[in-house]
Structure formats: C-alpha cells, structure tokens
C-alpha cells in the first residue's frame, strides 16, 4: 500500500489535533479494496448487523426510529448505488483480514503524532460509507477521533464545535453513553455555528471526539473511508458523562466535562468506582 499520508498532511493534522476539525490530503484513491465490487464482497463477508443501510433522502435531524428502509439487499444497494437513493455504512471493517491491514496501514503514520498529544491509539476501528447522489447523513456525533477519507465522488461535511452545550446538551451525551443512538436533535438556529468542509477524492477531514456533524453527498455516488481511534482522554470524557448521568438522576445539576487538555479525572475515577461497587454487589 502506498503511504496514505504525506508529510504535509501530517503537519496539518499536528496543527489541529485533537480539538479542531480540518482538511488533510490522503493517497488512498484507487485502492483495490475500495471499489464498489470489492465492497460488495466485503459486505457479504462481515456480520449482517455491521452493514447498516437505508434510504438517503433524509432530513438533517432524524429520529432514528423513523429511518426508512430502501427495500433492497446489501449487495443490491451497493451495485445500484448510482440510482437507488440510498446511504450505507459497513462497520468494523477490521474484522476482515484484508481491511484490517488497510486500516492499520492507514493509521500507522499517525501513531507518533497522536502518541505525543493524547497517548496511545486505542480501539482502532474502520467504517466505509457508500452513498447515492444527494444522500444525507443526519446530524449526529461519535465518540472517536475520526479522519474521513474521500475516495470517490464529492460531499460536504458540516462540523460543529465539540462541547457546545447549545448544540448538544449534556443530557444527550449522557444518553448516548448509556446506550442511546448517535443521532442528535436538529435546530435551524445551529447552522451559523457549523464549518462546512468540501471533500473531493483525495481530501480528508479530521473530526474531533463528539463534534456534532452532518453530511450531504454531491451529485455523484460517493465512497468514503473513516479511520478512527479512541484515546485515554476520550474514555475519561465518556466516564465523566456517566458520572454526570448518575448525578442528574440524583437531582443534581452537574457541570459538563471539560474539553482537552483537561482530563476529567475526578469524575472518571468516581464513575468507575461506582460501577465496580455495583458489580460487586450484584455478584454477592
């Protein structure tokens, strides 16, 4: 595999990581594992629950329970992506040996940079998005550090500030980490806070942990590869939201976890202590 990120891309990531979104360049366009036919094969090898797909003509804000089916099989969706009006994600591609190597090869050049700032890369995972012309990925957030690499077609990703309580209130983070869906409520008043990144083949965008975003595909079918990792900081942020959920249930009004470089250690350790005590009580 060719080197996925050249020195200018690494320098660009270094200047924004981990808290600011920004554009990078990558070298994975044309990779044999990222063609539509290769993705048909992958979709039929991975676990069925890891191929998520639906109609693509969606609003920015969507109740996940109202997501419409496209009525097709996974293979039919990919093969007809130019005309079927659909959106698809193939999740946890690292479960396949060839795509495991692709993911690790893409992340390896980033390791030294990431280690200097947020420590070791943890829980490295990959996702491939296949979208029809005009398809929308609704407004949501994710718990990982994420770089989305555009392989084919064009799309616009609009990214909002991570940690902005007006865009995603603390209770939404808490519900997500308690097993809730990634989708977020949308309000047109949020629009001015977003930063739009136009992506063409060879472009990539870094998205910080829990930075809300939504995506609109261009006039052609799109293939994008998302390479993600967790950091110890991201887990402390998650556990701090878990602590806040318990505090809110107790009638308190907890302050939101602080963003990097603050590590939220007190809340993180307290939440894990509560979980350990609860497990011990259940076992006795």
Image (cartoon, rainbow, N blue to C red):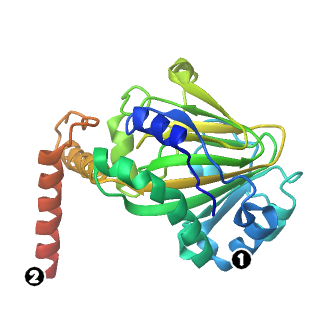
Viewer-closest of 2 and 225 = 2
**Residue at point 48% right, 42% down?**
10
Above/below status of 271 relative to 254: below
Residue carrying label 1: 44
**Residue at point 58% right, 50% down?**
64
Residue 140 seen in render: no
Q: Is residue 217 left or right of residue 158?
A: right
Residue 89 image-quadrant placement: bottom right
Above/below status of 246 relative to 41: above
Q: Residues within 10 Å of mark 2 (few under 14, many from 20)?
A: few
Image coordinates of residue 211 in percent, x first then y, are 45, 37
Q: Which element carries disc 2, helix, strand or loop? A: loop
Query: Between tags 2 and 1, which lies in front?
Result: 1
Quarter holding the C terminus?
bottom left
Residue carrying label 2: 284
Q: Residues within 10 Å of mark 1 (few under 14, many from 20)?
A: few
Above/below status of 42 relative to 175: below
The residue most toward the bottom is 284
Image coordinates of residue 21 in percent, x first then y, are 48, 33
Image coordinates of residue 152 in percent, x first then y, are 76, 48
């Amino acid at each position: 595999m060719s080197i996925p990120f050249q020195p200018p891309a690494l320098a660009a990531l270094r200047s924004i990581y981990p808290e600011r979104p920004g554009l990078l360049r990558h070298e994975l366009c044309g990779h044999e594992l990222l063609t539509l036919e290769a993705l048909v094969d992958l979709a039929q090898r991975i676990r069925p629950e890891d191929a998520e797909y639906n109609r693509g003509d969606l609003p920015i804000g969507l109740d996940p329970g109202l997501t419409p089916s496209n009525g097709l099989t996974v293979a039919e969706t990919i093969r007809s992506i130019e005309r079927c009006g659909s959106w698809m994600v193939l999740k946890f591609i690292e479960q396949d040996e060839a795509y495991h190597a692709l993911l690790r090869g893409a992340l390896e050049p980033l390791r030294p940079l990431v280690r200097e700032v947020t420590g070791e890369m943890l829980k490295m995972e990959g996702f491939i998005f296949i979208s029809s012309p005009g398809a929308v990925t609704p407004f949501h957030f994710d718990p990982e550090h994420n770089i989305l690499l555009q392989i084919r077609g064009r799309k616009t990703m609009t990214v909002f500030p991570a940690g902005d309580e007006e865009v995603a209130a603390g209770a939404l983070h808490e519900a997500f980490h308690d097993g809730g869906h990634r989708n977020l409520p949308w309000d047109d008043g949020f629009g001015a806070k977003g930063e739009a990144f136009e992506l063409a083949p060879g472009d990539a965008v870094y998205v910080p942990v829990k930075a809300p975003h939504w995506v609109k595909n261009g006039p052609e079918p799109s293939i994008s590869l998302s390479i993600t990792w967790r950091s110890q900081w991201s887990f402390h942020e998650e556990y701090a939201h878990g602590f806040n959920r318990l505090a809110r249930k107790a009638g308190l009004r907890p302050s939101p976890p602080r963003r990097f470089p603050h590590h939220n250690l007190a809340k993180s350790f307290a939440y894990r202590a509560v979980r350990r005590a609860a497990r011990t009580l259940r076992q006795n």
